[in-house]
Protein backbone atom coordinates (compact mmCIF):
# COMPACT_ATOMS: atom_id res chain seq x y z
CA UNK A 1 0.00 0.00 0.00
CA UNK A 2 1.28 3.45 -0.91
CA UNK A 3 2.59 5.41 2.06
CA UNK A 4 0.74 8.70 2.59
CA UNK A 5 2.12 11.65 4.57
CA UNK A 6 0.10 14.28 6.42
CA UNK A 7 0.94 17.23 8.64
CA UNK A 8 0.68 16.59 12.35
CA UNK A 9 -2.14 18.80 13.57
CA UNK A 10 -0.75 21.79 15.46
CA UNK A 11 2.81 21.05 14.32
CA UNK A 12 2.51 21.95 10.64
CA UNK A 13 5.79 22.87 8.89
CA UNK A 14 7.64 20.98 11.65
CA UNK A 15 6.48 17.34 11.44
CA UNK A 16 4.56 14.93 9.22
CA UNK A 17 3.15 11.49 10.07
CA UNK A 18 2.78 8.68 7.55
CA UNK A 19 0.06 6.06 7.13
CA UNK A 20 2.60 3.42 8.22
CA UNK A 21 3.51 5.22 11.44
CA UNK A 22 6.73 6.99 10.47
CA UNK A 23 7.45 10.56 11.58
CA UNK A 24 9.34 13.05 9.41
CA UNK A 25 10.97 16.13 10.92
CA UNK A 26 11.51 19.36 9.00
CA UNK A 27 13.45 21.12 11.75
CA UNK A 28 16.81 20.76 9.97
CA UNK A 29 18.06 21.75 6.54
CA UNK A 30 16.86 18.44 5.08
CA UNK A 31 13.83 16.39 6.20
CA UNK A 32 14.68 13.28 8.22
CA UNK A 33 12.77 10.23 9.44
CA UNK A 34 12.98 10.37 13.23
CA UNK A 35 13.86 7.51 15.57
CA UNK A 36 11.43 7.16 18.45
CA UNK A 37 11.61 5.32 21.75
CA UNK A 38 9.31 2.86 23.52
CA UNK A 39 7.47 3.82 26.70
CA UNK A 40 7.41 1.52 29.72
CA UNK A 41 4.41 -0.34 28.27
CA UNK A 42 6.09 -0.99 24.93
CA UNK A 43 4.32 1.69 22.85
CA UNK A 44 6.40 3.79 20.41
CA UNK A 45 6.41 7.43 21.50
CA UNK A 46 8.02 10.66 20.36
CA UNK A 47 8.45 14.18 21.73
CA UNK A 48 7.47 16.94 19.28
CA UNK A 49 9.32 20.25 19.61
CA UNK A 50 8.73 23.75 18.24
CA UNK A 51 9.92 27.03 19.67
CA UNK A 52 9.51 26.60 23.44
CA UNK A 53 6.67 24.07 23.19
CA UNK A 54 6.91 20.28 23.33
CA UNK A 55 4.50 17.35 23.41
CA UNK A 56 5.29 13.70 24.11
CA UNK A 57 2.71 11.44 22.50
CA UNK A 58 2.15 7.89 21.29
CA UNK A 59 2.86 7.28 17.60
CA UNK A 60 -0.33 5.25 17.07
CA UNK A 61 -2.38 8.18 18.33
CA UNK A 62 -0.72 10.55 15.85
CA UNK A 63 -1.59 8.16 13.03
CA UNK A 64 -5.20 7.87 14.18
CA UNK A 65 -5.59 11.63 14.56
CA UNK A 66 -4.25 12.22 11.05
CA UNK A 67 -5.94 9.41 9.11
CA UNK A 68 -8.95 7.96 10.95
CA UNK A 69 -12.22 9.91 11.37
CA UNK A 70 -13.54 9.97 14.94
CA UNK A 71 -17.15 11.25 14.71
CA UNK A 72 -18.09 9.81 18.13
CA UNK A 73 -15.06 11.47 19.75
CA UNK A 74 -13.82 8.20 21.25
CA UNK A 75 -10.80 8.73 23.53
CA UNK A 76 -8.63 5.63 22.89
CA UNK A 77 -6.89 3.94 19.96
CA UNK A 78 -6.68 0.14 19.62
CA UNK A 79 -4.10 -1.94 17.79
CA UNK A 80 -6.42 -4.46 16.12
CA UNK A 81 -3.83 -7.25 16.06
CA UNK A 82 -2.53 -6.47 19.55
CA UNK A 83 1.00 -5.62 18.29
CA UNK A 84 1.93 -2.32 19.93
CA UNK A 85 4.61 -1.44 17.37
CA UNK A 86 2.39 -2.05 14.31
CA UNK A 87 1.16 1.49 13.71
CA UNK A 88 -0.17 1.09 10.18
CA UNK A 89 -3.43 2.95 9.76
CA UNK A 90 -5.29 -0.23 8.78
CA UNK A 91 -4.29 -1.78 12.15
CA UNK A 92 -5.75 1.04 14.25
CA UNK A 93 -9.25 2.00 15.40
CA UNK A 94 -10.82 4.52 17.75
CA UNK A 95 -12.53 3.04 20.82
CA UNK A 96 -13.94 3.85 24.26
CA UNK A 97 -12.08 3.08 27.48
CA UNK A 98 -14.23 0.00 28.09
CA UNK A 99 -13.82 -1.21 24.47
CA UNK A 100 -10.08 -0.76 24.83
CA UNK A 101 -10.06 -2.69 28.09
CA UNK A 102 -12.08 -5.60 26.70
CA UNK A 103 -9.89 -5.72 23.59
CA UNK A 104 -6.79 -5.96 25.81
CA UNK A 105 -8.30 -8.96 27.60
CA UNK A 106 -9.31 -10.62 24.33
CA UNK A 107 -5.79 -10.23 22.93
CA UNK A 108 -4.21 -11.43 26.19
CA UNK A 109 -2.51 -8.05 26.78
CA UNK A 110 -4.06 -7.28 30.15
CA UNK A 111 -4.60 -10.22 32.48
CA UNK A 112 -4.99 -9.22 36.12
CA UNK A 113 -2.38 -10.69 38.43
CA UNK A 114 -4.36 -11.81 41.45
CA UNK A 115 -2.68 -15.13 42.18
CA UNK A 116 -4.66 -18.22 43.03
CA UNK A 117 -7.88 -16.23 43.19
CA UNK A 118 -7.61 -15.63 39.47
CA UNK A 119 -9.80 -18.16 37.68
CA UNK A 120 -7.63 -17.68 34.60
CA UNK A 121 -4.70 -19.42 36.35
CA UNK A 122 -6.55 -22.62 37.30
CA UNK A 123 -6.54 -25.83 35.20
CA UNK A 124 -9.44 -26.05 32.75
CA UNK A 125 -10.89 -29.07 30.94
CA UNK A 126 -12.49 -29.16 27.48
CA UNK A 127 -15.48 -31.35 26.54
CA UNK A 128 -17.05 -31.98 23.14
CA UNK A 129 -20.66 -31.32 22.10
CA UNK A 130 -21.49 -34.87 23.28
CA UNK A 131 -20.10 -34.05 26.72
CA UNK A 132 -17.09 -36.38 26.41
CA UNK A 133 -13.72 -35.22 27.73
CA UNK A 134 -11.26 -34.02 25.07
CA UNK A 135 -8.27 -32.26 26.63
CA UNK A 136 -6.96 -30.47 29.74
CA UNK A 137 -5.00 -27.20 29.90
CA UNK A 138 -2.85 -25.67 32.63
CA UNK A 139 -4.87 -22.43 32.56
CA UNK A 140 -7.72 -20.69 30.80
CA UNK A 141 -5.27 -18.38 29.03
CA UNK A 142 -3.43 -21.36 27.53
CA UNK A 143 -6.74 -22.95 26.49
CA UNK A 144 -7.86 -19.69 24.89
CA UNK A 145 -4.60 -19.31 22.99
CA UNK A 146 -4.52 -22.89 21.66
CA UNK A 147 -8.21 -22.84 20.66
CA UNK A 148 -8.16 -19.21 19.42
CA UNK A 149 -11.19 -18.22 21.48
CA UNK A 150 -11.88 -15.63 24.16
CA UNK A 151 -10.48 -16.49 27.62
CA UNK A 152 -13.16 -14.64 29.62
CA UNK A 153 -15.88 -16.63 27.82
CA UNK A 154 -14.21 -19.91 28.76
CA UNK A 155 -14.30 -18.78 32.38
CA UNK A 156 -17.95 -17.75 32.11
CA UNK A 157 -18.78 -21.16 30.63
CA UNK A 158 -16.96 -22.98 33.45
CA UNK A 159 -18.99 -20.97 35.98
CA UNK A 160 -22.30 -21.71 34.27
CA UNK A 161 -22.98 -18.16 33.06
CA UNK A 162 -23.04 -19.27 29.43
CA UNK A 163 -23.65 -22.75 27.99
CA UNK A 164 -20.61 -23.20 25.74
CA UNK A 165 -17.66 -21.39 24.23
CA UNK A 166 -16.04 -22.07 20.86
CA UNK A 167 -18.39 -25.02 20.36
CA UNK A 168 -17.12 -26.78 23.49
CA UNK A 169 -18.12 -27.20 27.13
CA UNK A 170 -15.60 -26.13 29.78
CA UNK A 171 -15.17 -27.06 33.45
CA UNK A 172 -12.60 -26.67 36.23
CA UNK A 173 -13.49 -30.22 37.29
CA UNK A 174 -12.34 -33.30 35.40
CA UNK A 175 -15.02 -35.80 34.37
CA UNK A 176 -15.12 -38.64 31.85
CA UNK A 177 -18.35 -37.13 30.58
CA UNK A 178 -19.97 -33.86 31.56
CA UNK A 179 -23.69 -33.16 31.77
CA UNK A 180 -24.64 -29.61 30.84
CA UNK A 181 -27.80 -27.64 31.48
CA UNK A 182 -29.56 -26.22 28.47
CA UNK A 183 -29.74 -22.83 30.15
CA UNK A 184 -26.94 -20.94 31.91
CA UNK A 185 -27.31 -20.33 35.62
CA UNK A 186 -28.37 -16.85 36.71
CA UNK A 187 -26.00 -14.92 38.94
CA UNK A 188 -27.53 -11.91 40.57
CA UNK A 189 -24.46 -10.53 42.34
CA UNK A 190 -21.46 -10.78 40.03
CA UNK A 191 -17.98 -9.82 41.17
CA UNK A 192 -16.57 -6.72 39.50
CA UNK A 193 -13.05 -5.72 38.52
CA UNK A 194 -11.66 -2.21 39.02
CA UNK A 195 -9.09 -0.71 36.60
CA UNK A 196 -7.42 2.66 36.36
CA UNK A 197 -8.26 4.90 33.41
CA UNK A 198 -5.39 3.33 31.41
CA UNK A 199 -6.82 -0.17 31.84
CA UNK A 200 -4.40 -1.39 34.54
CA UNK A 201 -5.97 -3.84 36.99
CA UNK A 202 -6.41 -2.51 40.56
CA UNK A 203 -8.73 -4.71 42.60
CA UNK A 204 -11.47 -7.33 42.52
CA UNK A 205 -14.66 -6.58 44.48
CA UNK A 206 -17.27 -9.08 45.63
CA UNK A 207 -20.03 -7.07 43.95
CA UNK A 208 -20.89 -3.56 42.76
CA UNK A 209 -22.22 -2.53 46.17
CA UNK A 210 -18.94 -3.38 47.90
CA UNK A 211 -17.02 -1.62 45.12
CA UNK A 212 -19.13 1.52 45.55
CA UNK A 213 -18.43 1.56 49.30
CA UNK A 214 -14.71 1.10 48.65
CA UNK A 215 -14.46 4.21 46.43
CA UNK A 216 -17.35 6.17 48.01
CA UNK A 217 -19.14 6.03 44.66
CA UNK A 218 -22.40 4.93 43.09
CA UNK A 219 -23.35 1.25 42.77
CA UNK A 220 -25.66 2.05 39.84
CA UNK A 221 -22.90 3.92 38.01
CA UNK A 222 -20.53 0.99 38.46
CA UNK A 223 -23.19 -1.37 37.08
CA UNK A 224 -23.80 0.95 34.12
CA UNK A 225 -20.05 0.90 33.42
CA UNK A 226 -20.06 -2.92 33.58
CA UNK A 227 -22.92 -2.96 31.07
CA UNK A 228 -20.96 -0.57 28.79
CA UNK A 229 -23.58 2.16 29.16
CA UNK A 230 -20.90 4.60 30.39
CA UNK A 231 -17.12 4.47 30.03
CA UNK A 232 -15.98 5.09 33.60
CA UNK A 233 -17.00 6.09 37.12
CA UNK A 234 -14.87 8.04 39.62
CA UNK A 235 -12.02 7.91 37.07
CA UNK A 236 -12.03 4.10 37.13
CA UNK A 237 -13.05 1.53 34.51
CA UNK A 238 -15.33 -1.25 35.72
CA UNK A 239 -16.21 -4.66 34.25
CA UNK A 240 -17.88 -7.77 35.55
CA UNK A 241 -15.29 -10.36 36.51
CA UNK A 242 -14.14 -12.03 33.28
CA UNK A 243 -16.63 -9.93 31.29
CA UNK A 244 -15.91 -9.13 27.63
Image (cartoon, rainbow, N blue to C red):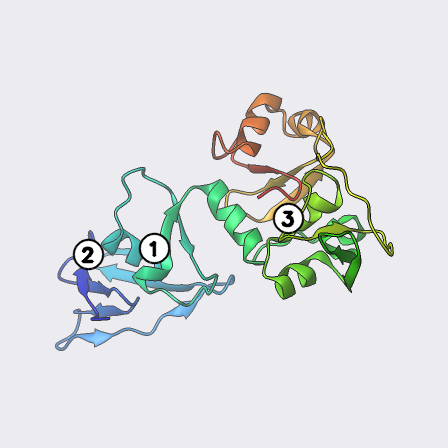
Label 3: how many residues lie within 10 Å, few (<14), some (14-19) or many (20+)? Answer: many
Residue beneath disc 1: 61
* Relative side of 20 to 212, left or right: left
Point out which mark residue 11 bears.
2
* Quadrant in which the N terminus is drawn: bottom left
* Relative side of 234 to 17, left or right: right
User: Going from the N terminus, do you reach mark 3 or mark 2 first?
Assistant: 2
Q: Position of residue 13 (x, y in %)?
A: 13, 61
Nearer the observer, disc 3 or disc 2? 3
Nearer the observer, disc 3 or disc 1? 3
Q: Secondary structure at mark 2?
A: loop
Q: Secondary structure at mark 3?
A: helix
* Quadrant in which the C terminus is drawn: top right
Nearer the observer, 82 or 152: 152
Q: CA distance from mark 1 to mark 2?
A: 14 Å
Nearer the observer, 233 or 241: 241
Q: CA distance from mark 3 to mark 1?
A: 28 Å
Label 1: how many residues lie within 10 Å, few (<14), some (14-19) or many (20+)? Answer: many
* Relative side of 174 to 168, left or right: right
With respect to residue 35, does 97 lie above or below?
above
Nearer the observer, 25 or 108: 108
Q: Which quarter of the picture shows residue 205?
A: top right
Residue at the spot x=37%, y=61% of the render?
91
Point out which mark residue 152 bears.
3
Q: Position of residue 61 (x, y in %)?
A: 34, 55
The reply to whether residue 114 is visible in this rendering is no
Label 2: how many residues lie within 10 Å, few (<14), some (14-19) or many (20+)? Answer: some
With respect to residue 158, does 37 lie above or below?
below
Nearer the observer, 55 or 208: 208
Residue at the spot x=53%, y=47% of the render?
102
Amino acid sequence: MEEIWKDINGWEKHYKISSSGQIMSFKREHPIIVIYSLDRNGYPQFTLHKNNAKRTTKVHRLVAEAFIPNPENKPCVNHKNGIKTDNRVENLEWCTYSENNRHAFKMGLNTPNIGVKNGMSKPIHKYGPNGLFIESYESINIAASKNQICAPNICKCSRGQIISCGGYYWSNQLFEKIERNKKPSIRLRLAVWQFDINGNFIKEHENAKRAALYINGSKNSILRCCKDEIDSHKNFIWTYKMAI
